[in-house]
Image (cartoon, grey):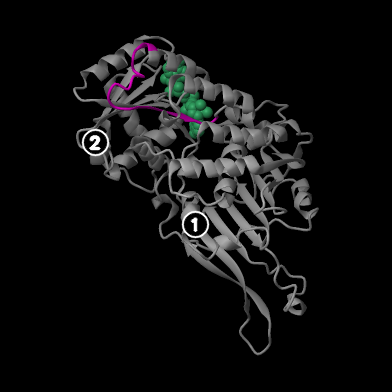
Amino acid sequence: MFHQDESFSLIIFGATGNLAQLKLIPALYDLVAAGLLPPKMSIIGVGRKELSNAEFRDYSYRVLHQPNRHHQHPIQDDLAQKLLDRMHYIAGDISQPAIYEQLSAMSQQEKSCDNKIFYLATYPDLYQTIFNHLEDSGLNQQKCGFVRVIIEKPIGTNLDSAHQLNRLLNTYYQEEQIFRLDHYLGRETLQNLLTFRFGNSLFEPLINHETVDHIQVTASEDFGIGERGGYYDSVGALKDVGQNHILQMIALATMDAPTAFTNQEITSKRTELLRELIPETDKLVFGQYEGYLQEKGVASNSDRDTFFALRTQIKNKRFAGVPIYVRAGKMMARTVTEIAIVFKDQTKGLLQHLSQDQDHRNILIYRIQPNEGIVLRFLSKKPGFDLQLQDEYLQYCYKHSAADLPDPYLRLLIDALRGDQTFFVDAAEVEAQWQFIDPLIAARQHLHPYTAGSWGPIAAQKLIEADGRKWIEPSVSFCSL
Ligand SMILES: NC(=O)c1ccc[n+]([C@@H]2O[C@H](COP(=O)([O-])OP(=O)(O)OC[C@H]3O[C@@H](n4cnc5c(N)ncnc54)[C@H](OP(=O)(O)O)[C@@H]3O)[C@@H](O)[C@H]2O)c1
């Protein structure tokens, strides 16, 4: 995949932080384990902690053995060593030139052309100073070899700040150098939506307003905010997952077919769809779980949302009049993420006398996690002498357990090395996301309390029931390994 002679430097600003611990260092190990580590690649961590190279390697070794990551894959010492041998560390303050002088010196030692990726695993208010120093020290120059920059959410906190950040990025870099990472786009189960939808002739022609009654998106977690209180309390559910992950799911499930499987085409189709989403400010519920105010790092009078439910519609011919209902939150009844496409009721005609007001509609479920799969509910005759109806299921379950599916960070890291931006977000897309979210934030009025372990506030039920519909209880009975 990479030319033997190509040399790469991955420079991680914030290598001692939480993101690097939980995601990046483990993903780098996975890169080695998958045999995909470019032969000439060095990894340079930057942080304030005073660590020598050897101490940074020890630290990384311990990170790999943390129980919350890789517990299903035992770490192999020989592979870990292969990674650690490539790791270096520079201690210092990111806002001071000393770090960049050391980086330049390291870069000049390289005999061949060095491709550089700057991974900003640190706070957004440091971006400007980092970019400035990289520019002044010549590290941004692409004399030979590429320079790319990866940044993580949050990409702004509203449309205005996202626009400012995009302008800042574009001051220093071309769009093709900028990789805005939303790890949801790296999920196998989401990426497969494109193949499933556009590679089969069966389903796509049916997904439109003539056959689809409505769409539901559920992204619930049965746990709270853990140690992330300080961060979470500054954003809340709608900004934490709604602005990015949920909108990505809706975009991939409903966007028009790209004319080619290219970054430009796929990203522009996602963006087009996002621009067509109508923020229905009167169809919106915010909630907070009981006990949230006692969580570590949360202000005692916080009015932050830990749950939201909303209705939206797509302003295009294909989906005219098809509502999309979304609910997402923490401390809910079950951890599950899925998109359910609910088709119109066919039992109203010929079989009406047998359906007895039961809901027998066909449903196509894209289960993102857990019990990853694609499931289709259909109506069948119950075996026997009388004509009776029963629901049955066709299901495709991912043959691997979730732990064996490619890790989203690993996948996106490989894409960044290859320069493939298909599953990264560009400036226009992130602004289209905020364009949808900002009016919802502005319209927020009540905050409904809900019991931990429930499906959210009663108001969320009323939101969908007002349209004569019900939330689908996500099943865990299918695709359980
Ligand atoms: N944590 C996650 O799971 C997650 C997920 C998605 C996105 N993000 C985003 O990723 C970014 C980092 O988050 P995080 O949770 O990893 O934060 P964090 O745990 O607080 O880590 C921050 C890192 O930045 C370094 N740093 C801060 N100020 C510095 C300075 N002046 N000079 C040198 N190094 C400095 C810290 O070094 P020292 O520790 O050595 O001081 C540390 O390595 C944030 O923008 C966050 O929103 C995080």
What amino acid type is highlighted by mark number 1? Phe
Identify the main secondary structure in magenta.
Answer: loop
Query: Which residue is more in the foreground, 75 or 250?
Result: 250
Question: What's the residue at 46%, 55% (across, down)?
Answer: 195
Kindly state the secondary structure of the residue where label 1 is placed: helix
User: Which residue has dot 2 on it?
Assistant: 82
The answer to whether residue 476 is seen in the rendering is: no
Question: What's the residue at 42%, 55% (across, down)?
Answer: 401
Query: Which residue is more in the foreground, 276 or 193?
Result: 276
Instruction: State which tag comes first along the sequence, 2 or 1.
Output: 2
Query: Which residue is more in the foreground, 137 or 69?
Result: 137
Q: Relative to residue 24, is residue 455 depicted above or below?
A: below
Point out the stretch of residues depicted in magenta.
Answer: 136-154
Whole-Å distance between the Cαs marked 2 and 1? Answer: 40 Å
Question: Residue 404: x percent and y percent?
Answer: 39, 52
- Asked if the stretch drawn in magenta spans residue 139, the answer is yes
